[in-house]
Image: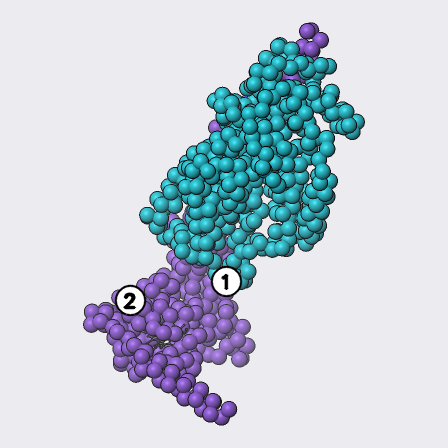
Chain colours: A purple, B cyan
């Protein structure tokens, strides 16, 4: 029994060794390595990248710099560590794209933009490049009951958000330097109209130009959601509104016209006609024949 | 069954024909036992159906992906077999092919039984059969389903008329000759013989009507199976999205129907001792007909699988590879080989067109035809364009549940019961038509 387990353990070890020995290294060509991130290290891009990271990578890699990755073999690297960040943008991009072993390929699951955004986010942990990031260290007071208020200037289609929190002394104070997202509900998802640098100013205010050509429903209404982009600091803070400042449209319902895909009442005339003509034609012959059959017995009497 | 009476040219008199055909209708040993057996099977099936009604379609193997299963495959099979009525009694009849006379009534009986049960099978497949009339009330003219329901009902009515009308003279004889018949049956004979006494006028009148129906059933027969194929072809699914589905189904139906007819012919010849009427010549001719329809069907099969197989569009390729080499390969290839290619090779030989061999071949053809329908319906449902994912395991496969299988057995037993009853109360071989053909004079008295 003991022998057996020793043998088994040895076998497992040998296998594990063979496995790691045979595990191929990442092969990243020189041209792939030279690729540069086409997106700048702006605060906006970094925060977009953070969202992508949290939904797609965090489950395995843990939080950057915290080294709390899943205990896989080989381990998913801490993507915020300096050791890792010595790699070029192109190299990281390539690895994310192709994957290896337990590392999935993101070639199809993430579009290029998202991949580069994650890389921008990871770069923000890079001590050598950090200066590139435009950050103004703002320290907001500790607050509770954070909320967003909205002023609408219908005439100029401007939206002014006011982000405030309740300070310890019971007064409301504007929160500065917080990114807000202005999202408009569309048929298949949300349209972000926040623009490039949607950060609140010193008063906690942010002014957004609503697109002048954005179509709404028949009354020109759209559903707006404003929220704090990064949910880490204050949790989910959002405000929903119905705005009547979009361009009114008159959408055509494809079910209103006569078509093959239409309802019964909207069937194409030709198909109704063929059906009815066929049914009436064939069944009248059937009834004619039936009628004629009953004539047979009359012929008997004649003879 | 024993088929050793060699058919020799016996001289037939009207009396003899009458006696030979009417005898099995009057005393037929073992019939009660057979009917009791069928009714038992039907009762078990009815119980299974009751379970399905009570608990819902969840008791079947069908789930979200495979929502057309055994029932629909079986439905297509029944519709296919029923097409033999149109092929034999109408197409060949209109072409004045005269050897079909003794077997056309059997073909018509098969047609009526199978199309009636086909309609029922659809109802059996419904989770809420109480809503069946909604097809008519709310059905869309654009949907092949409305057309299918219409056309199947129409085909059933015309087939029934084509069974009864040519039988009127014979029924006039039955009315007079079968003295032992129960009063109900006598009444039926009296009504359905329409006072026919074979006056030249009546004869002409009747045959004009029959010819009208024979012409009428051609478009309806084509429509019934073409529209059935459109139930599939009107979708964009792999394997169904083809332009030849209509003729492909019609050709396949001729094969299945002919096979069913040959089996029935053999059965009636031996069991009803009709060797003088359903002769070796008829099996020989049916064999040749079968080779012809099999070749047409083979031609369609080549088109249906070779052309998409050459292109292997990404959706089709998943489907076709599963059929050719995957988990459906055995069913696919055996239905092609045993149901089409081998029968053609064998039946070009005169020896294999003798009654017994051709009957055995026909059993294979018919069984293959059934499996072929299964292969047409189910694999496509398992190969949707978007991958099947994040669903319970039993959504990803399909195997009919015991309830489904039992209900399907019911449909067969019911079709056989209808054939049995029709063949018991009606003469399976047309008496007067044969006499007409042989130039034998006869009189029908009131």
Residue at horizontal 32 percent and vertical 68 percent from the top = A97
Q: Residues within 10 Å of mark 1 (few under 14, many from 20)?
A: few
Q: Is residue A198 above or below residue A154?
A: below
Quarter of the image for the C terminus of chain B: give it: top right
Q: Residue furthest top?
A: A302
Residue at 68% across / 27% down in the picture?
B22
Is residue B155 visible in the rendered image? The answer is: no
Mark 1 and mark 2: span between their CA atoms?
A: 35 Å
Residue B390's tag is: 1
Give the image location of residue B228, x and y in percent.
Answer: 51, 38
Q: Chain of mark 1?
A: B
Q: Residues within 10 Å of mark 2 (few under 14, many from 20)?
A: few
> In the picture shown, does residue A110 fall above or below A142?
above
Asked whether A276 or B403 is in front, the reply is B403
Quarter of the rendering containing residue B327: bottom left
Q: Is any part of residue B402 visible from this angle?
A: yes
Please tell me whether mark 1 sits on a helix, a strand or a loop: loop
Q: Provide the residue designation for mark 2.
A: A39
Mark sitting on residue B398: none
């Amino acid at each position: 029994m003991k022998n057996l387990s020793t043998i088994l353990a040895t076998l497992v070890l040998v296998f594990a060794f063979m496995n790691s020995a045979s595990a191929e290294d990442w092969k990243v060509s020189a041209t792939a390595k030279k690729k540069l991130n086409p997106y700048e290290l702006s605060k906006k891009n970094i925060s977009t990248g953070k969202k992508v990271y949290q939904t797609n990578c965090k489950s395995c890699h843990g939080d950057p710099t915290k080294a709390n990755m899943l205990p896989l073999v080989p381990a998913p690297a801490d993507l915020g560590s300096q050791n890792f960040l010595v790699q070029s943008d192109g190299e990281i991009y390539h690895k994310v794209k192709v994957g290896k072993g337990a590392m999935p390929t993101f070639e199809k699951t993430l579009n290029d933009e998202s991949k580069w955004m994650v890389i921008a986010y990871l770069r923000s942990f890079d001590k050598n490049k950090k200066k590139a990031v435009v950050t103004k260290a703002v320290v907001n007071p500790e607050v509770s009951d954070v909320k967003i208020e909205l002023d609408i200037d219908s005439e100029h289609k401007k939206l002014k958000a006011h982000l405030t929190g309740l300070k310890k002394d019971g007064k409301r104070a504007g929160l500065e330097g917080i990114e807000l997202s202005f999202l408009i509900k569309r048929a298949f998802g949300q349209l972000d109209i926040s623009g490039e640098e949607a950060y609140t100013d010193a008063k906690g205010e942010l002014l957004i130009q609503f697109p002048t050509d954005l179509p709404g429903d028949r009354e020109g209404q759209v559903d707006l959601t404003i929220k704090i982009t990064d949910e880490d600091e204050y949790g989910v803070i959002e405000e929903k509104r119905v705005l009547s400042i979009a361009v009114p449209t008159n959408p055509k319902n494809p079910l209103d016209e006569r078509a093959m895909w239409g309802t019964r009442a909207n069937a194409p005339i030709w198909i109704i006609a063929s059906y009815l003509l066929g049914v009436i034609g064939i069944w009248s012959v059937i009834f004619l024949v039936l009628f004629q059959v009953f004539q047979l017995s009359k012929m008997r009497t004649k003879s | 069954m024993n088929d050793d009476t060699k058919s020799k040219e016996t001289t037939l008199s009207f009396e003899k024909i009458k006696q030979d055909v009417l005898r099995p209708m009057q005393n037929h040993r073992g019939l009660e036992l057979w009917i009791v057996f069928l009714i038992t099977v039907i009762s078990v099936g009815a119980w299974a159906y009751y379970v399905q009604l009570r608990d819902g379609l969840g008791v079947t193997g069908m789930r979200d992906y495979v929502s057309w299963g055994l029932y629909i495959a079986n439905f297509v099979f029944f519709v296919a077999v029923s097409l033999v009525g149109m092929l034999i009694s109408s197409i060949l009849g209109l072409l004045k092919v005269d050897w079909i006379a003794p077997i056309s009534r059997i073909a018509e009986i098969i047609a009526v039984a199978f199309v009636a049960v086909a309609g029922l099978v659809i109802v059996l497949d419904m989770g809420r059969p109480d809503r069946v009339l909604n097809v008519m009330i709310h059905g869309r003219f654009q949907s092949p389903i409305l057309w299918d329901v219409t056309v199947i009902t129409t085909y059933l009515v015309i087939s029934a008329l084509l069974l009864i009308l040519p039988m009127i003279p014979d029924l006039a004889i039955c009315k007079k000759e079968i003295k032992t018949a129960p009063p109900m049956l006598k009444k039926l004979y009296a009504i359905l013989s329409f006072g026919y006494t074979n006056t030249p006028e009546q004869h002409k009148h009747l045959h004009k009507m029959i010819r009208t129906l024979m012409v009428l059933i051609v478009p309806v027969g084509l429509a019934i199976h073409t529209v059935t194929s459109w139930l599939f072809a009107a979708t964009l699914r792999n394997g169904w999205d083809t332009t030849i589905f209509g003729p492909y189904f019609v050709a396949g139906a001729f094969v299945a129907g002919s096979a069913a007819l040959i089996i029935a012919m053999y059965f009636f010849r031996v069991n009803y001792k009709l060797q003088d009427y359903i002769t070796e010549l008829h099996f020989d001719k049916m064999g040749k007909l079968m080779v012809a329809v099999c070749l047409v069907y083979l031609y369609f099969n080549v088109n249906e699988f070779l052309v998409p197989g050459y292109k292997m569009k990404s959706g089709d390729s998943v489907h076709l590879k599963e059929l050719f080499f995957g988990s459906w390969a055995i069913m696919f290839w055996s239905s092609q080989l045993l149901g089409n290619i081998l029968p053609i090779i064998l039946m070009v030989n005169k020896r294999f067109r003798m009654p017994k061999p051709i009957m055995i071949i026909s059993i294979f053809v018919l069984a293959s035809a059934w499996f072929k329908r299964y292969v047409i319906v189910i694999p496509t449902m398992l190969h949707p364009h978007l991958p099947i994912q994040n669903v319970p395991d039993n959504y990803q496969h399909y195997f009919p549940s015991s309830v489904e299988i039992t209900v399907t057995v019911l449909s067969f037993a019911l079709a056989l019961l209808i054939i049995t009853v029709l063949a018991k109360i009606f003469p399976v071989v047309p008496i007067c038509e044969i006499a007409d053909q042989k130039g034998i004079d006869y009189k029908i008295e009131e």
